């Protein structure tokens, strides 16, 4: 029935070739117009998984209460904490004015002024006692610097330290760090290099840590999800603003962007990188493969035109069905080119064989339809069923892809039996003087036939021996591993992820009240995987009465020093020179005759002070800016911290409360992991531990873990439905359980070998390359069907047959289309290309080498084929004589008017 239906369709397409081609051209034009005018792409990755899942609902509930997604995070980095603060403040103020680009612009964490004022109160009593003692001991230095914020005042402060050494209160070695740090800065100034100095680092007695040199700005941009890069305009605005403010020159600051918006935008940009070059090379390689397999420009043109028509129709149908494509369903075009071309190659290679045997063009086309009609139909139906199996899953991205690709396979099949034969009929390619099969493989055919049982046994033993490898098959569920670490957003994110203070891997949850939040936090703090848990109550320091008493004692001594009554007038340049030289002399004198690091540092600083005194006035002006600007910031922050007062939940800044409490009283809880959770196992262990205590938790780590579970379940679910639907389809068509097993067995074998090789080659599955598995199913089942149908028709020596040629060149074209992804700059896309290439290799080997051996000799021998007539130059077909049937009619009738014996034979088959 299938053969007759396909044959009639081909006969109609040949007889009315111009009508078919014109209609195809009109439909193609209309489809292109519809697809282009209705094209929409939603780049929101949150739309790839069904929002109806319980964890997605919790995620949406939390996001509605505390919007944390679609954020641009500007990371401002400078050589000192003071410069980082200045640059961040200037940039925040400038961006806040751009209400046309941003919904909100705030420094993070919120409530910066509150933490500056209450910072000392958050220390432990022991830490605070040590801090206040050091501050009170530094009162003379604070007085000198506050009363004379100049180079002269700096030298006076240094003199206080030297006096401490002379009086025995200090050792010269105790001043090693500040003297060396001052020398480092002076040497940069004198050499014309960018220079900086941090008084905060000086107070701590050690260089500032990385997180202290970094400030974050939380930016909620206005996004355009209709664009490939929704946040590009906002990102460009931030960079342009930073450039206009000249943050690099004024504050030696850099601004980098990360966060969900920047990560997604740069991921799309990475995917597009070199895409034109890759696509051009792919097309050229596919053309080379088609030339190798088809050897006729006219046939190749017909195959390409047929593929283009099918792609246009599929694109229009896809836009009608889903209206808006997502980041996965947009790959339907790659799937169509990779899989849809198979039908065209199968038809065209078989046509070449029939043309060699029959000689006459139309007769050869009809004979082609008679032989490939049933296999192509069954293959198209099976591949479509495989894709449609993703429809009931919760992985919305692949579900939509399956819907479009499934219909695309049916469209590709239909155009291959209408447009392709019609175009071949019109183009009239020349005849085929030589057989089309792989005659050179005849010895291998005979070897495989003689050693059938050993080959089956050895193959089965090898594959079975590799089954334990599947225990080590990994699924890399961290989406960051699919991104290029070279791009700014990913590199910045990875840097932040190593800093516990950045809270990148934080799990969050909602609690109905503050009391409930504290109860939940108490349970979570007991988990060994948790470092700390923050709630609104955590933002109010404890033991305030004891701590405030220590701060007030320090303030009583330091506040007068911060506001001295003997403020000095700014010195002239000559006065600064004199002060520098005098201090250089004191340093030389105090270090004279001493050994140790302090003496070395004193001599070094003395030499640098002398050089600065002898330098041009511009160098001293630069030194004043480098030392005095951060000094004023440090003195202001010190005075602010000494004003700490009682804090309660009701006295917290509104913006800070808004970050932790909703208007109806619901509370946000943040859970931070302990140690380095950059590994999959550590992050998964942390997430599972939290979920075991609080199943309602959400946040990035939970989304990663649950997404992995959802996607893996979706692929197992779809794989089960696909195998079931394909098995039923094969049973209906083949009517023999043994033949169904002979078709599915090599397919499952190819899948198992592919996964075993993934372990051996250290190629973990991930969110991107797992798409290769349904593609393996689609390509594999098509190849297996072609062989089982040929075997049932009685064909032998399959390895040297025209079928193997068609399958080989189809696999090469598909591998080129998919394998080109291997060379993508995007790691996820590249991993997809690697796994696709591997799976296609296994599928081809299972179909070409293993399945013929597994099937053995056909149950019935095929009818002998007529000898090929001599090839004559192609001529225009003349009209058939009156009363003589046209070639099309002859073949159609021959398919109907079989003898009773032929009908019985056909029924048995």
Image (cartoon, rainbow, N blue to C red):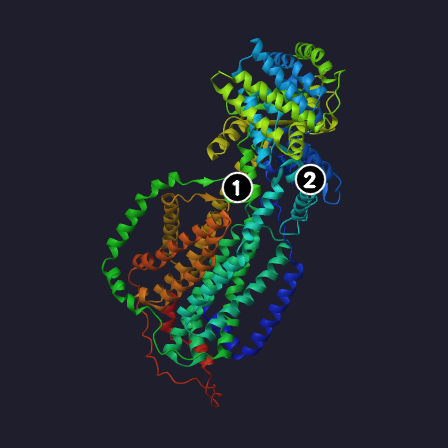
> Would residue 701 be seen by someone viewing this image from the given angle?
no
> What residue do we see at 62% from left, 28% from top?
613
In the visual, does 266 lie left or right of 680?
right
**Label 1 to label 2: alpha-carbon separation:** 22 Å
Q: Which residue is mark 1?
A: 479
Q: Nearer the viewer, residue 343 or 326?
A: 326
> What residue do we see at 47% from left, 17% from top?
595
Q: Nearer the viewer, residue 99 or 551?
A: 551
CA neighbours of label 1 inside 10 A, class few (<14), some (14 to 19), many (20+): some
**Relative vertical location of residue 165 with respect to residue 262 in this rendering, above or below:** above
Residue 558 image position (x, y, % from top left)? 70, 14
> Would residue 102 be seen by someone viewing this image from the given angle?
yes
Q: Nearer the viewer, residue 872 or 596?
A: 596
Q: Nearer the viewer, residue 813 or 371?
A: 813
Residue 755 image position (x, y, % from top left)? 39, 46
Q: Earlier in the sequence, mark 1 or mark 2?
A: 2
CA neighbours of label 2 inside 10 A, class few (<14), some (14 to 19), many (20+): many
Q: Which residue is mark 2?
A: 220
Residue 661 image position (x, y, % from top left)? 70, 27
């Amino acid at each position: 029935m299938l053969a007759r239906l396909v044959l009639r369709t081909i006969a109609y397409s040949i007889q009315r070739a111009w009508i078919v081609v014109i209609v195809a051209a009109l439909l193609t034009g209309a489809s292109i117009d519809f697809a282009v005018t209705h094209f929409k792409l939603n780049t929101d990755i949150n739309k790839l998984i069904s929002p109806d899942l319980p964890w997605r609902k919790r995620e949406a509930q939390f996001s509605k209460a505390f919007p944390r997604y679609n954020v641009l995070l500007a990371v401002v980095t400078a050589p000192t904490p003071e410069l980082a603060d200045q640059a961040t403040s200037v940039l925040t103020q400038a961006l806040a004015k751009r209400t046309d680009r941003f919904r909100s612009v705030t420094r993070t964490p919120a409530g910066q002024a509150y933490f500056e004022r209450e910072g000392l109160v958050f220390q432990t009593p022991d830490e605070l006692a040590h801090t206040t003692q050091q501050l009170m001991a530094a009162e003379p230095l604070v007085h000198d610097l506050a009363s004379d914020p100049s180079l002269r005042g700096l030298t006076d402060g240094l003199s206080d330290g030297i006096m401490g050494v002379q009086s025995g209160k200090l050792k010269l070695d105790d001043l090693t760090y500040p003297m060396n740090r001052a020398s480092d800065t002076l040497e940069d100034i004198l050499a014309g290099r960018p220079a900086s100095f941090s008084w905060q680092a000086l107070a701590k007695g050690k260089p500032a840590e990385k997180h202290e040199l970094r400030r974050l700005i939380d930016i909620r941009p206005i996004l355009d999800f209709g664009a490939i890069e929704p946040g590009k305009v906002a990102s460009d605005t931030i960079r342009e603003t930073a450039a206009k403010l000249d943050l690099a020159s004024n504050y030696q600051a850099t601004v980098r962007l990360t966060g969900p918006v920047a990560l997604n935008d740069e991921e799309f940009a990475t995917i597009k990188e070199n895409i034109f070059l890759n696509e051009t090379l792919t097309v050229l390689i596919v053309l080379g493969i088609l030339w190798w397999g088809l050897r006729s420009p006219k046939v190749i043109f017909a195959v390409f035109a047929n593929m283009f028509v099918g792609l246009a129709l599929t694109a229009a149908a896809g836009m009608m069905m889903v209206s808006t494509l997502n980041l996965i369903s947009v790959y339907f075009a790659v799937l169509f080119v990779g899989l849809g071309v198979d039908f065209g190659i199968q038809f065209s290679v078989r046509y070449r064989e029939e043309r060699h045997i029959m000689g006459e063009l139309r007769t050869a086309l009809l004979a082609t339809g008679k032989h490939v009609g049933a296999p192509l139909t069954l293959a198209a139906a099976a591949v479509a069923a495989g894709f449609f199996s993703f429809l009931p899953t919760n992985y919305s991205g692949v579900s939509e892809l399956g819907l479009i690709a499934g219909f695309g396979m049916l469209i590709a099949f239909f155009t291959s039996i209408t447009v392709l034969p019609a175009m071949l009929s019109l183009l009239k390619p020349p005849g085929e003087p030589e057989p089309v099969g792989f005659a050179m493989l005849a010895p291998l055919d005979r070897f495989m036939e003689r050693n059938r049982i050993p080959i089956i046994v050895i193959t089965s033993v090898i594959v079975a021996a590799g089954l334990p490898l599947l225990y080590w098959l990994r699924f890399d569920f961290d989406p960051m591993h699919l991104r290029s670490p070279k791009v700014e957003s990913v590199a910045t994110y990875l840097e932040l992820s190593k800093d516990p203070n950045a809270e990148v891997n934080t799990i969050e949850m909602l609690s109905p009240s503050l009391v409930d939040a504290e109860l939940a936090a108490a349970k979570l703090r007991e988990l060994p995987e948790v470092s700390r848990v923050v709630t609104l109550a955590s933002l109010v320091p404890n033991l305030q009465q004891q701590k405030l008493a220590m701060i007030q004692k320090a303030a009583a001594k330091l506040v007068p020093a911060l506001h001295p009554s003997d403020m000095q007038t700014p010195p002239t340049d000559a006065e600064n020179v004199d002060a520098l030289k005098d201090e250089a002399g004191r340093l030389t004198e105090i270090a004279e005759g001493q050994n140790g690091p302090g003496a070395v540092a004193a001599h070094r600083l003395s030499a640098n002070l002398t050089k600065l005194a002898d330098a041009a006035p511009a160098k001293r002006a630069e030194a004043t800016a480098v030392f005095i600007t951060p000094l004023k910031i440090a003195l202001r922050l010190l005075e602010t911290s000494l004003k700490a007062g009682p804090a309660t939940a009701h006295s917290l800044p509104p913006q800070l409360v808004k970050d932790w409490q909703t208007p109806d009283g619901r509370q946000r809880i943040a859970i931070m992991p302990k140690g380095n959770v950059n590994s999959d196992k550590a992050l998964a262990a942390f997430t599972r531990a939290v979920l075991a205590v609080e199943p309602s938790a959400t946040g990035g780590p939970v989304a990663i873990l649950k997404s992995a579970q959802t996607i893996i379940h979706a692929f197992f679910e779809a794989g089960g439905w696909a195998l079931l639907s394909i098995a039923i389809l094969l049973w209906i068509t083949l009517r023999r359980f043994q033949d169904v097993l002979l078709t599915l067995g090599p397919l499952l074998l190819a899948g198992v070998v592919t996964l075993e090789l993934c372990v051996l080659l250290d190629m973990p599955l991930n969110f991107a390359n797992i798409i290769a598995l349904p593609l393996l199913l689609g390509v594999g089942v098509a190849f297996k069907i072609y062989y089982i149908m040929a075997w049932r028709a009685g064909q032998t020596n399959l390895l040297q047959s025209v079928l193997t040629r068609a399958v080989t060149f189809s696999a090469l074209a598909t591998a080129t289309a998919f394998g080109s992804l291997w060379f993508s700059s995007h790691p996820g896309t590249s991993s997809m290309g690697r796994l696709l290439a591997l799976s296609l290799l296994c599928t081809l080997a299972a179909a070409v080498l293993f399945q013929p051996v597994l099937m053995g000799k056909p149950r019935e021998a095929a009818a002998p084929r007529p000898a090929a007539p001599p090839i004559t130059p192609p001529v225009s077909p003349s009209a058939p004589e009156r009363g003589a049937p046209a070639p099309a009619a002859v073949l159609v009738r021959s398919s109907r008017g079989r003898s009773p014996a032929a009908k019985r034979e056909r029924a048995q088959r």
